[in-house]
Image (cartoon, rainbow, N blue to C red):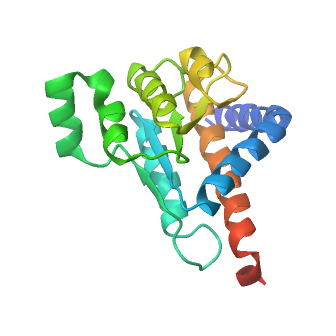
Amino acid sequence: MINTIKTDLAQISQNFIALQEKASTIAEIANLWIEALAKGNKVIFCGNGGSAADSQHLAAELMGRYKIDRNPMPAMSLTVDTSALTAIGNDYGYENVFARQLKGIAKEGDVLVGISTSGNSKNIVEAFKTAKQLGVKTVAFTGEGGGLMKEEATVCLNVPSKITNNIQEMHIASGHIICGLVESHFFAAKQA
């Protein structure tokens, strides 16, 4: 058991060392969020399964707080309203559960962050297509290859792994870094 733990931790460490190569992409994403929020827009998140939980987590970091006690920043996750998800899924198909919500709440200048380990989640790909029509910039958090989302995204953070749990670990860490950069940009004076 101890050897398994050490092996897993060594792999995770190597993944994060490799993730450093994505620093410029992470900075680009932080700048997209900053630009949107500075103009009074919002950051919208979506994902499925564990990535749904990550989308809720990151929206909460912006709306609540990350490290600084400060005013909320407008952010939300499209995964939280089970009535909307089930009604849209039933009436329009599961591939439209995020796109349909986006049509109702998004405006030009917002940013949509889609989180998917495969990068091929149909409902996120459809949401990205809808976002383009609405003038909403898109950020894909994916695994190594990027999948179909990479082709549709304004920016793609395709983290260096093909293993689901390792991808998720890097997604949430990258999201935390971005939240920290955004928070510091707007509220650095409160940090002192």
Residue positioned 38% across, 25% down in the render: 123
Relative depth, front residue between 147 and 106: 106
Along the horizontal axis of the image, is 48 left or right of 31? left
Work out whether 34 lies above or below 82.
below
* Residue 166 x %, y %: 62, 32
Residue drawn 69% across the image and 75% down it: 187
Q: Quadrant of the C terminus?
A: bottom right
In this orientation, does residue 176 appear? no
Q: Is residue 87 visible?
A: yes
Measured as percent of width and height from the top left, residue 171 is found at 62, 39
Q: Measured from the top left, where is residue 79 in percent x and y?
A: 34, 43
Q: In this view, does 45 lie to the left or right of 157?
A: left
Q: Count the marks.
A: 0
Please state, as top left, top right, bottom left or bottom right, where the N terminus lies in the image: top right
Residue under the image location 60 percent in, 45 percent down = 172
Return the residue nearer the eye: 191 or 12.
Answer: 191
Position of 91 with respect to 26 (left or right) is left
Residue at point 58%, 15% (across, down): 147
Q: Where is residue 104 in the image (x, y as percent from the top left)?
A: 31, 43
Instruction: Please identify the quarter of the rendering in which residue 155 is found.
Output: top right
Instruction: Write down the quadrant of residue 8 in the picture.
Output: top right
> Is residue 95 depicted above or below 191 in this figure?
above
**Depth order, front residue of 126/18:** 126
